[in-house]
Image (tube, rainbow, N blue to C red):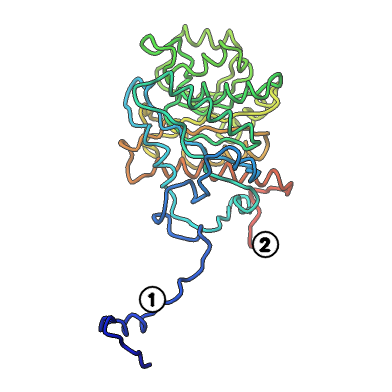
Amino acid sequence: MVINMSPNTPPFAASLAALGWNGTPEQRDPLDRPSYVGPVSFAQLPWVEDVAEIRRRKADIAIIGAPFDDAVTHRPGTRFGPRAIREAQYQTGTLHSLQVGVEPFTALTAIDAGDAQVYPGRLEHGHGAIYRKVREVAETGAIPIVLGGDHSITWPNATAIAEMRWPQRIGILHFDAHADASIDGYGSLHSHGSPMRRLIESGAVLGKNFVQVGLRGYFPDNETLGWMREHGMRSHFMTEIEERGSEAVIATAIAEALDGPDAIWISLDIDVVDPGLAPGTGTPEPGGMTSRELLEAVRRICLELPIVGIDVVEVAPPFDSADITAILANRVVLEALSAIAKRRNGTTYSATQNLLDR
C-alpha cells in the first residue's frame, strides 16, 4: 500500500495505517466493556439520577448508594461500601444466572440512581437525604436496592416505603448477627444498633411483621429481648440453623413473613455471614451463615415473596480481604434481581434443573 506523505505527515503514519489504529472505531454495546473501564455503576447499568428520566425509562429496579456510617458504634468504614459493592464485579455485558436460568437485565429494566447526598458528621441530615432519595425513586415504580452504609439506614429506607404504601403494611425480613433493637447507642437514637426499634416505635412496621435470621453472639441483653418479645418480633438464632438446617429455617421465615404484610423489605447485614467468609464489616461475629446459605436464602425469598425493596449494609472495605465481602454483597444483589426476574416471568423454578437439559 502506498501512502502519499505530505510534509506535515509524520514518518510513522504508514505503520499506524498498517496497524489499523487510525481506522474507524469498532462499534460495540457500551455495556460490553471490562468492569474496570469507564464510570463506576452497579453492573455498568446506566447512571440515571433524574427522577423524571427514571420514570420515563419505566425502570423496574433502581440501585441507590447510601455512603453513610456516622451511626456506627465500633469500626467505621461502611461509607465506602456502595462504591466497593459496585466495583466488585468482573462479568460484563449480558449476565445470565445459572441458578435460576434468567438474564436479569434483559428481563428487568434497571438503572443506577446514584447516591443519596450525605455528608460526614451530619447524622440527621444523612438519614433525611436517604429517606428522600428512596422515597422519590420508589414513587417512580422502581424497586429500590440500597447499598450501605451502616445499618441505621434501614430506618429511613423502610420508613419511606411504609409511608408510600400506607395503609398497606410492609414486613421486614432481617438477616443479621445482631437484633438491632437496642433502645439507643451511647445515647443516640439514630445508632446502627437501633433501627428496628425505631421502625416499630414509630408504627412504620409492626413488631409482629419483623422476621430475623442469623442472630448470635453476646447481645442483646435480657431487657432488649423482653422488649422484642413484647412487640411480637420473630427471631431465628444461629443455634436453630445449626440444629434444623438453613433450608428449613428459611422456609419457616418465609411463612412467617407472609403472615400479615402485603409486601416485604429485605434488610441484609453482611455480618450475618461468618467473618471467615466476609471479614469486611464493622462488628464481625464468628459462627455465622455461609455465603452459599445466604445466597440460597435470598434466592428463595425473592422467588416466593413480593419484594418492595432491599438494603445490603455494613460492608466495610477497610477491613476486607481480597474484596471477598464486597463481592459477596454484589452477588447478593445479583441473586435477588435474578430471582425477582424469574418470579415476574412466571416460569417454574427447580433447584435440581440442569440448564443443559431441554
SS class of the residue under badge 2? loop
Q: Nearer the viewer, mark 2 or mark 1?
A: 1
State the residue in front, 139 or 226: 139
- Where residue 265 sits, quadrant-wise, is top right
Identify which residue is drawn at 34% across, 90% down. 4
Instruction: Give the quadrant of the C terminus.
Output: bottom right
Q: Is residue 116 left or right of residue 203?
A: left
Q: Is residue 204 above or below residue 341?
A: above
- Where residue 121 sits, quadrant-wise, is top left
Visible in this render: residue 176? yes
Identify which residue is drawn at 40% across, 12% down. 188
Q: In the rendering, which numbered label is found on residue 357?
A: 2
Determine the residue located farthest toward the front in the rendered image: 7
**Which residue in the protein does label 1 denote?**
22
Q: Is residue 134 above or below residue 87?
A: above
Amino acid on which disc 2 is placed: Asp
Q: Is residue 32 above or below residue 74?
A: below
SS class of the residue under badge 1? loop
- Where residue 285 sits, quadrant-wise, is top left
Q: Is residue 158 above or below residue 84?
A: above
Residue 304 is situated, as x and y percent measured from the top left of the image, at 68, 37
**Total numbered badges shown on the rendered structure:** 2
Amino acid on which disc 1 is placed: Asn
Q: Residues within 10 Å of mark 2 (few under 14, many from 20)?
A: few
State the residue in front, 274 or 347: 347
Residue 324 is situated, as x and y percent measured from the top left of the image, at 38, 44
